[in-house]
Every structure is written in C-alpha cells, then in structure tokens.
Image: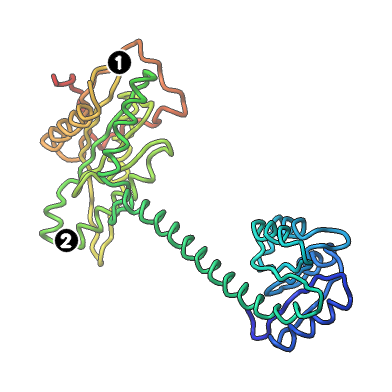
Amino acid sequence: MGTTLRLLLIEDNAQHRALMQEELRRELAAEVAAAATGEEGLAQLAAGTYDAVVMDFRLPDLDGLTVLRRMGEQGIAVPVIIVTGMGDEQLAVRALKAGAYDYVVKGRNLDFARRLPAAVRDALAAFADSQQRERQLRQLREEREAFAELSVRDDLTELFNRRHLAQVLPAEFERARRYRQPLTAVMADIDGLKAVNNLHGHHCGSAVIRHVAKVIAGAVRISDSCFRYGGDEFVLLLPSTPEKGGLTLGHRLCERVAGLPLTFEGKTLSVTLSIGTATYAAGNYASAEELLRAADEVLFRAKAAGRNTVLSAQPEAPASTAPASKEQAQDGAPGPATRQVTEPPRAM
C-alpha cells in the first residue's frame, strides 16, 4: 500500500455514492474512485491499482458474487467490503464465503456510511495478514523443496549422494527384473587420490573429486544416474544397458578423465580412474545389493590390476536378453589407453 490509500467505490445510488466517498476521504485521507456498475468497476480494477474495494451487493448489471468471482478469474487480489440493504445479511454472508473481507448493512438512515472507514481498516489489516501468511507458506514450501534437493545431493560434487542411491537402486533393480531388461552398475575410483592429498593437500584432492564428478556427469545419458558413493568412489546406474554398454561407458570415462588434466593453483595434475562393472541380466543376481557388491569387488580387482583399467564381472548377456535400442545402448569403442578384463560372475 502506498502513502495515499486508493479505494474503488462501486455503488449505483448517486446519493449513497457521494456520501460514502466523502466519509472515506475524510476519515481515511483516501483517494476514492467511483463506478456505478459492476462492469465499470471491473474495468477500473483491470486498468488501475487499488488498495481496497467498497461495493454494493445489488448492482444494475451484476451482483456482488459475480464481481467477486470475476475478480478471482482475473487475478485481482484486493480486499472487498460489501454493502447490503437491510434484510440482505444472508447475501453478505455468502459474499464473505466467496472472498469478501467484511460487510456493512445500510439502515433506514445514512449512518451506515460512518461505519465504512472502520470496516475498510479492518479489511486492510486482515488482507495484510493473509498476504503475509501466504508469503511465509510459499517461503516454507520453497525451503522444503530446496532441503529435499539438498538431502539427495552431495555437497562437494552436486551428484546424487549415497543416501539417494539406497533409494534408487532397489527401484531400478526391481524395474529391470520385472521388465526383463539389463541393468548395469558401474563403480569408479580415482587412482592415487591419497598421494594427491599427501602431496598437495586435501583442498587439492577435493578439486580433483569435483573435476572427475563433472566429467562423469557430462558423459552419461539423461536416463542414467550418477552418485558419489563416498570419498573418491562413484556409482553409475545404467538402465536398459547390457554388459557391453557398461564397458563402453567405462572406457569412455577413463579416456575423458585421462585426457583432461586438472590445473589447480598453477599445478597440472593428471588423473585416471579404475572402473568395475556388473550387469543384471536374466536373474543372475538375486538383489540390488548383490549387483552393487559385484561391481565393488571387481573394482577392487581393477585397482590391483593397474591404473586406468576397466574390469567387468559379467560374461556376455544371454542370447534371450533383448538387445538395447540405439537410444538405450552406450555408443563408442574402447580406446587403446585403457585395459579391459572380463571375468565370469562370482558366486554369491
């Protein structure tokens, strides 16, 4: 509300209109525009800005309920005070239910006009409280949404966190089982990060983790999910992706990370990954936990086999498994800079 209160008075009775205008101007120091019909009042509301509306319920063209409804449809949010004749109190109550803030009843004399300024003040105060509550509720909703997003994101990398993986992995595994589609889990570990921390400090190690996370996030499809599993480990879930697609992505990640050295505080650091993959196909794993554990174990072997290495725990998927579409399959081919070893699945 500005320094000068701006009111719109919608009243078809000329004598009442003049009296009400005078009372509102004198008691509230307000600018009071006037309209004689509902349509005229709606047009003025659409064209200007008003702090409140004082409106006779019975107008020549529209009733108060219709005006209130159309104000709502047009997004005009200002408090409305209804003026009714004696015996029309039930109509005023209906108007309150429709969104009006207060009402004043016309009596046999013109004393009702004296009650209007107080009704306007009360309506303005109630409207301000309502607006404040709405702002607080909106802020609360936004904060809850932001908190929900933060609760599933890793602070350092902005990838999904391990807590979210615990929610997503069982659902993805069940979907793959139900629809008989492959699901590949990829576990990646940054090679030699402990040495980086010891030599350059943990702040440098954190920069390496962020760098690798960015490369990983830029290498996957929109249907894939990336998680920071903990420390320098990452997990990727690749729906509808057979073992070959997981290996292809593993090699792509190794090549991109190795091909993008990190410059940090004037130092150029070469970074490589070790990667293990495991693929659910035709019921070879009984649970999501077994699938992830298989990828973790083969990652451990990849670390032992040497840096920049991709290992798979799976043989080729059985012939009965439907091949992935072009959109589903990971494209590309293993590069010469990485090594690939394929092992049979471990007994669980």
Type of the residue with mark 1: Ala
Q: Tell me how far mark 1 sits from mark 2, CA to CA.
A: 43 Å
Asked if residue 203 is positioned above or below residue 225 in the image, the reply reads below
Residue sitting at 69 percent across and 56 percent down? Answer: 94
- The residue beneath circle 1 is 282
On screen, 285 above or below 4?
A: above
Residue drawn at point x = 43 percent, y = 39 percent? 222
Q: Secondary structure at mark 2?
A: helix
Task: Report x, y in % for residue 144.
Answer: 39, 55
**Disc 1 element:** loop
Mark 2 — residue? 202
The number of numbered badges drawn on the structure is 2
- In front: label 1 or label 2: 1
Residue 281: % across, % down: 30, 19
Task: Say which quarter of the image contains residue 264.
Answer: bottom left
Q: Give left or right: position of 323 versus 89.
A: left
Name which residue lies at 72% across and 82% down.
114
Identified at 36% across, 18% down, the residue is 180
Query: Between residues 204 and 181, which one lies in front from this camera angle?
Result: 181
